[in-house]
Image (cartoon, rainbow, N blue to C red):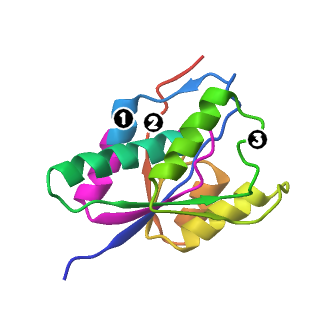
Amino acid sequence: METKTVCAVIGTTLKETEGIQYTTDAVSAKVNELVKNGTVDFLCHAGYGFPLQAAEAVIALRDARKQQGLDTPQLCIIAPHESQSSDWSDEARERYYSVHEHTDGVSFFQNRYSDDCYEKCEQYMIDNSDCVLCDDETSTAAQYAKSQGKTVVVCEVLSVA
Protein backbone atom coordinates (compact mmCIF):
# COMPACT_ATOMS: atom_id res chain seq x y z
CA MET A 1 0.00 0.00 0.00
CA GLU A 2 1.38 3.39 -1.03
CA THR A 3 1.99 5.91 1.74
CA LYS A 4 0.13 9.18 1.25
CA THR A 5 2.11 12.09 2.65
CA VAL A 6 1.00 15.55 3.70
CA CYS A 7 3.62 18.31 3.56
CA ALA A 8 3.43 21.62 5.41
CA VAL A 9 5.09 24.53 3.65
CA ILE A 10 6.60 26.98 6.10
CA GLY A 11 9.20 29.61 5.63
CA THR A 12 10.37 33.14 5.60
CA THR A 13 7.64 35.67 4.99
CA LEU A 14 8.98 38.98 3.76
CA LYS A 15 8.16 42.55 3.16
CA GLU A 16 8.40 43.07 -0.59
CA THR A 17 11.41 45.34 -0.15
CA GLU A 18 13.51 42.68 1.58
CA GLY A 19 16.19 41.10 -0.55
CA ILE A 20 15.93 37.32 -0.21
CA GLN A 21 15.48 35.62 -3.57
CA TYR A 22 14.69 31.99 -4.38
CA THR A 23 15.18 30.38 -7.73
CA THR A 24 11.94 29.15 -9.21
CA ASP A 25 13.81 26.08 -10.42
CA ALA A 26 15.06 25.21 -6.92
CA VAL A 27 11.62 25.54 -5.34
CA SER A 28 9.98 23.60 -8.18
CA ALA A 29 12.60 20.85 -7.95
CA LYS A 30 11.94 20.37 -4.22
CA VAL A 31 8.17 20.25 -4.75
CA ASN A 32 8.61 17.78 -7.64
CA GLU A 33 10.92 15.60 -5.50
CA LEU A 34 8.35 15.53 -2.69
CA VAL A 35 5.54 14.54 -5.09
CA LYS A 36 7.67 11.80 -6.68
CA ASN A 37 8.31 10.47 -3.17
CA GLY A 38 4.60 10.25 -2.35
CA THR A 39 3.48 13.67 -1.14
CA VAL A 40 -0.14 14.09 -2.17
CA ASP A 41 -1.23 17.11 -0.12
CA PHE A 42 0.45 20.43 0.63
CA LEU A 43 -0.66 22.78 3.40
CA CYS A 44 0.57 26.35 2.99
CA HIS A 45 -0.28 29.82 4.33
CA ALA A 46 1.01 31.50 1.13
CA GLY A 47 2.69 34.38 2.96
CA TYR A 48 4.74 36.67 0.75
CA GLY A 49 8.15 35.10 0.26
CA PHE A 50 9.00 31.42 0.26
CA PRO A 51 5.49 30.11 1.10
CA LEU A 52 3.84 31.99 -1.78
CA GLN A 53 6.49 30.85 -4.24
CA ALA A 54 6.16 27.25 -3.07
CA ALA A 55 2.37 27.41 -3.47
CA GLU A 56 2.84 28.65 -7.04
CA ALA A 57 5.25 25.76 -7.68
CA VAL A 58 2.70 23.21 -6.41
CA ILE A 59 0.03 24.67 -8.71
CA ALA A 60 2.38 24.62 -11.72
CA LEU A 61 3.39 21.01 -11.03
CA ARG A 62 -0.22 19.97 -10.48
CA ASP A 63 -1.23 21.50 -13.82
CA ALA A 64 1.68 19.88 -15.67
CA ARG A 65 0.98 16.45 -14.15
CA LYS A 66 -2.72 16.77 -14.96
CA GLN A 67 -1.89 17.40 -18.64
CA GLN A 68 0.30 14.29 -18.59
CA GLY A 69 -2.48 12.19 -17.05
CA LEU A 70 -0.54 11.69 -13.80
CA ASP A 71 -1.79 11.88 -10.22
CA THR A 72 -1.79 15.45 -9.03
CA PRO A 73 -0.92 16.91 -5.63
CA GLN A 74 -3.53 18.90 -3.75
CA LEU A 75 -2.87 22.35 -2.29
CA CYS A 76 -4.78 23.74 0.67
CA ILE A 77 -4.17 27.31 1.76
CA ILE A 78 -4.53 27.89 5.48
CA ALA A 79 -4.11 31.64 5.83
CA PRO A 80 -3.16 32.83 9.33
CA HIS A 81 -5.77 35.65 9.21
CA GLU A 82 -8.25 37.13 6.76
CA SER A 83 -6.35 40.34 6.00
CA GLN A 84 -3.01 38.65 5.30
CA SER A 85 -2.35 40.49 2.03
CA SER A 86 -3.98 43.83 2.87
CA ASP A 87 -0.72 45.82 2.96
CA TRP A 88 0.89 44.11 -0.05
CA SER A 89 1.43 45.76 -3.42
CA ASP A 90 -1.18 45.21 -6.12
CA GLU A 91 1.16 42.81 -7.95
CA ALA A 92 1.83 40.71 -4.84
CA ARG A 93 -1.88 40.64 -3.96
CA GLU A 94 -2.66 39.47 -7.51
CA ARG A 95 -0.23 36.56 -7.06
CA TYR A 96 -1.76 35.72 -3.67
CA TYR A 97 -5.34 35.72 -4.96
CA SER A 98 -4.32 33.82 -8.08
CA VAL A 99 -3.01 31.08 -5.80
CA HIS A 100 -6.32 31.17 -3.91
CA GLU A 101 -8.25 30.77 -7.18
CA HIS A 102 -6.18 27.76 -8.24
CA THR A 103 -5.97 25.96 -4.93
CA ASP A 104 -7.99 22.96 -3.83
CA GLY A 105 -9.21 24.71 -0.69
CA VAL A 106 -8.79 27.88 1.34
CA SER A 107 -9.43 28.39 5.03
CA PHE A 108 -8.46 30.98 7.59
CA PHE A 109 -6.79 29.97 10.82
CA GLN A 110 -8.30 32.96 12.61
CA ASN A 111 -10.24 36.06 11.60
CA ARG A 112 -7.93 38.81 12.78
CA TYR A 113 -4.21 39.36 12.91
CA SER A 114 -2.44 38.69 16.21
CA ASP A 115 1.26 38.72 17.08
CA ASP A 116 1.33 34.92 17.16
CA CYS A 117 -1.05 34.04 14.30
CA TYR A 118 1.70 32.92 11.90
CA GLU A 119 3.35 30.80 14.58
CA LYS A 120 0.05 29.16 15.55
CA CYS A 121 -0.91 28.59 11.91
CA GLU A 122 2.45 26.98 11.11
CA GLN A 123 2.24 24.80 14.22
CA TYR A 124 -1.22 23.64 13.14
CA MET A 125 0.04 22.79 9.65
CA ILE A 126 3.06 20.94 11.07
CA ASP A 127 0.88 18.98 13.51
CA ASN A 128 -1.28 17.87 10.58
CA SER A 129 1.54 16.89 8.23
CA ASP A 130 4.13 14.18 7.75
CA CYS A 131 6.92 16.41 6.50
CA VAL A 132 7.84 20.06 6.18
CA LEU A 133 9.24 22.05 3.24
CA CYS A 134 11.02 25.19 4.41
CA ASP A 135 13.77 27.64 3.54
CA ASP A 136 15.42 27.81 6.97
CA GLU A 137 15.98 24.70 9.03
CA THR A 138 17.03 26.84 12.00
CA SER A 139 13.66 28.62 12.24
CA THR A 140 11.47 28.09 15.27
CA ALA A 141 8.87 26.31 13.13
CA ALA A 142 11.44 23.95 11.57
CA GLN A 143 12.85 23.16 15.01
CA TYR A 144 9.32 22.45 16.25
CA ALA A 145 8.76 20.13 13.28
CA LYS A 146 11.96 18.23 14.07
CA SER A 147 10.93 17.92 17.72
CA GLN A 148 7.68 16.33 16.53
CA GLY A 149 9.57 13.78 14.44
CA LYS A 150 8.70 15.36 11.09
CA THR A 151 11.03 15.14 8.10
CA VAL A 152 12.29 18.64 7.23
CA VAL A 153 13.20 19.31 3.60
CA VAL A 154 15.17 22.52 3.06
CA CYS A 155 15.15 24.67 -0.06
CA GLU A 156 18.24 26.84 -0.04
CA VAL A 157 18.09 30.61 -0.35
CA LEU A 158 19.58 31.80 -3.63
CA SER A 159 20.86 35.18 -2.48
CA VAL A 160 20.47 37.88 0.08
CA ALA A 161 20.68 41.34 -1.41
The image quadrant that residue 141 belongs to is: bottom right
Distance from Cα at disc 1 to Cα at disc 3: 28 Å
Quadrant in which the C terminus is drawn: top right
**Helix, strand or loop for disc 3:** loop
Residue that carries the numbered disc 2 in the rendered image: 156
Q: Nearer the viewer, residue 14 or 145?
A: 14
Q: Position of residue 154 (x, y in %)?
A: 44, 46
Residue 37 among magenta residues: yes
Q: Position of residue 127 (x, y in %)?
A: 57, 73
Q: Nearer the viewer, residue 97 or 39?
A: 97
Distance from Cα at disc 1 to Cα at disc 2: 8 Å
Residue 99 among magenta residues: no
Q: Residue furthest front?
A: 101
Q: Position of residue 9 (x, y in %)?
A: 51, 54
Residue that carries the numbered disc 3 in the rendered image: 86
Residue occupying image coordinates x 44% and y 42%: 56
Q: Nearer the viewer, residue 63 or 161?
A: 63
Residue occupying image coordinates x 61% and y 32%: 92
Distance from Cα at disc 3 to Cα at disc 2: 28 Å
**Helix, strand or loop for disc 2:** loop
**Helix, strand or loop for disc 1:** helix
Q: Residue furthest bottom?
A: 1
- Which residues are the magenta region? 29-50
Residue that carries the numbered disc 1 in the rendered image: 26
Q: Is residue 153 left or right of residue 128?
A: left
Tell me which amino acid carries mark 1: Ala
Can you see residue 135?
no
Tell me which amino acid carries mark 2: Glu
The mark nearer the N terminus, 3 or 2, is 3
